[in-house]
Amino acid sequence: MFPLLLTDQLDDERTWVFPIGISGSLSHDLGEIEAEIAALAEGLDKAGEIRLFPRPLRRPAKALLVGIGAGDESDWRAAGAAISRAVSDNEPLQIMLGEQVAMRALAEGLWLGGYRYRDAREEPRSAEIQLMTTTPQAYAESLARAHTTAVAAWFARDLANAPASLKNPDWLAEEIVGAAAKRTGVTVRIRTGAELERFGGLRAVGAASKFPPCLVEMSWHPAGATTHVALVGKGITFDSGGISIKTRPGMKNMKIDMSGAAAVAAATLGAADLNLPVRVTALLPLAENAVGAAAYRPGDVLTHYDGSTTETTNSDAEGRLVLADALGYAAAELSADVIVDVATLTGAAEIALGTRIAALFSHDDELAGALTEAGRSAGEAMWRLPLPDDYREYLRSEVADRHSSPTRGAGAVAAALYLSEFLGDQAANWAHIDMAGPSWAAETDLEITRGATGWGARTLLRYLEGLSA
């Protein structure tokens, strides 16, 4: 990750960047070139719009202008991402900042916009960017939090972008163990084989793959923590659909079906990096949903961690089966104050809300509000959908406690209601985020680089920060 440095010294050897708000005002006395830059800035209203100064300068050698719109967090984040992409990766910059700057959002945008997948052929940005302000000490903490957020998002993106030929459950678990080992106070336990006896959904989904399933439990438990948050993330390392096989277009990108697991792991590591006084337990049920002689079938009845049963009506509705076990475990064993699960769960959520907004479900108004606000601040939008009890009728089975995939519509709602059944009394302090749509970007836009977005890592980290405020 390229370096960002706060400074109060002008550097003529760097390209100067001038953020321009809707007022068009400049934040520095630039002498003879000020009038020319002000003229070029006229009409530069859109956040992230870039204009190159049209002639060589003696001081500095090159300059460009970037719009920051109304100057809110999303505008500064968009401006930062645009700056990262506007110049070559080895070009050193100095961004000229005034008194009103959303420093964390700007820095997040710079780092997020400069993301490259670690195994991609394209080289990542390497040149340092200086953030010029007369009061650098005032922004040191904001810059540090931005760095932690960007590290979390990059980690989640890297995991999701990794090809399925590399990313089986063992590989993913090892990556998380390796990342945790670099942090003091983060522990990881991995359950496999006989340790998964009670996890009937997870075992069934992973049964046909030559790569066995596992459950990763990561813990950040700082001294003095008074709040315990359990984060649960769907971790299907590749989803063929199983016997209910997907179409070729629908299967092609299923390497990202573990994006929920990546997000909760990244947020937990971020909490440790920030030394947040919040206890976090992340549960990552990892499996590959393959086709084979050992595959579970539509019509099978599975027994989950809590002892209840599910009739499986569609083997491509596998995510809720592994989450059911993890949520049942969380409710029975963790005594958490809050449980939040994150999953690329249903195409229905994407149909309803598109590719930039996740679906949020919760019985708890306060929790739903806190997560929505965290997402707004982080730049990851959510929209709350209902959990009507009368829709539980859709889950009725004649041979089990419920069936897994209703055929009567409201797919995202029914899936959320299904998950809530495994929480008992803790359903009152639970939230489910279906981020199937925004987990992948078909093209680069704002701070999102084409590919896996790492959606959820930023939101969950902001939410955990809010609990410690």
Image: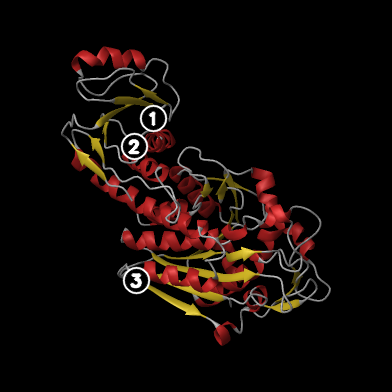
**Residue depicted at 61% across the width and 70% down the height:** 288
Q: Are marks 1 and 2 in contact (CB under 8 Å)?
A: yes
Query: Dot 3: within a 10 Å radius of its alpha carbon, few (fewer than 14), some, or many (20 or more) residues?
Result: few
Q: How far apart in space, not on screen, are marks 1 and 2 (Cα)? A: 8 Å
Percent x, y of residue 30: 21, 19
**Residue, far front:** 121
Query: Dot 2: within a 10 Å radius of its alpha carbon, few (fewer than 14), some, or many (20 or more) residues?
Result: some
Which of these two is toward me, 424 or 384? Answer: 384
Amino acid type for the residue under numbered disc 1: Gly
Label 1 or label 2, whichever comes before in sequence order? 1
**Residue, far right:** 398
**Residue depicted at 58% across the width and 62% down the height:** 428
Amino acid type for the residue under numbered disc 2: Ala
Query: Dot 1: within a 10 Å radius of its alpha carbon, few (fewer than 14), some, or many (20 or more) residues?
Result: some
- Residue 274 in sight: yes
Location of mark 2 (residue) = 102
Which of these two is toward me, 122 or 386? Answer: 122
- Residue 97 in sight: no
Q: How far apart in space, not on screen, are marks 1 and 3 (Cα)? A: 39 Å
Amino acid type for the residue under numbered disc 3: Ala
The label on residue 367 is none
Which of these two is toward me, 371 or 49? Answer: 49
Give the colour scheme of this rendering: secondary structure
Label 1 or label 3, whichever comes before in sequence order? 1
Location of mark 1 (residue) = 71
Which SS class for mark 3?
helix
Location of mark 3 (residue) = 181
Which SS class for mark 2?
loop
Which SS class for mark 1?
loop
Percent x, y of residue 189: 44, 78
The residue mark sitting in front, 1 or 3, is 3
